[in-house]
Image (spheres, rainbow, N blue to C red):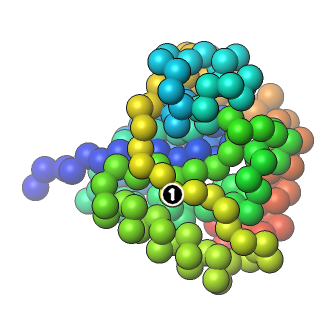
Amino acid sequence: MSAEIKKATFAGGCFWCMVGPFEQLPGVLSVTSGYTGGETEHPTYEEVCSNNTGHVEAVQIEYDSEITTYDDLLRVFWKQIDPTDNGGQFHDRGSSYQTAIYYYDEEQKLAAEKSKEQLDQEGPFEAPVVTPVLPAKKFFRAEEHHQDYHKKNRFHYLLYRKGSGREAFIQEHWGDKQ
């Protein structure tokens, strides 16, 4: 039986904070930090952070769908973000830090919409879930120093994750249910 390798793309604010949680899933082959959603070809970090390119920081995941399902990826995604905030994520503000799910086919679109609706109805949030479900656009790999930042600069990454408010938010809303 041959593996079926698929792609998934999620924008969850700072891409540094999104890589590690997905890497922990069995069947995830790679998690790449990058930019998507905009029109500028080959944007740089500085251009994206200017909030003028239309891009968001995102991660693109390649996974073996016989081991990990798209629903598994969605569950991890929702527990890393504040899906009720459309102005950015935690300390990072602006359109380049907004959340989004980018789908590659109708099956992903339906699964994402269903999980969003379920989170809105049953999740731990009082405000409505505003994370959009959008068709995938061209994904641009971020500069090399942004790849695996959580491993290369672990101390700074952990300080940032805590200082940004992400860690406390996740603990408050999900606790041990991660």
Tell me the kind of residue under disc 1.
Val
Q: Is residue 132 left or right of residue 136?
A: right
- The C terminus lies in which quarter of the figure? bottom right
Q: Which residue is mark 1?
A: 133
Say which residue appears at 72% left-offset and 72% top-offset: 128
Q: Residue furthest right?
A: 163
162 or 39: nearer the viewer: 39
56 or 62: nearer the viewer: 56
Say which residue appears at 26% left-offset and 59% top-offset: 66
Q: Position of residue 44 (x, y in %)?
A: 60, 16
Which image quadrant for residue 46? top right
Task: Give the answer, above or below, for where 89 lies relative to 160.
Answer: below
Could you classify mark 1 by the number of other residues whose Cα lies within 10 Å: few (under 14), some (14-19), or many (20 or more)? some
Say which residue appears at 78% left-offset and 48% top-offset: 87
Which image quadrant for residue 97? top right
Is residue 152 among the parts visible in the rendering? no
Question: Dot 1: what SS?
Answer: strand
Q: Residue furthest left?
A: 1
Q: Is residue 6 left or right of residue 3?
A: right
Task: Give the answer, above or below, for where 97 lies relative to 151.
Answer: below
Task: Give the answer, above or below, for where 140 lies relative to 15.
Answer: above
Q: Position of residue 38 (x, y in %)?
A: 54, 31
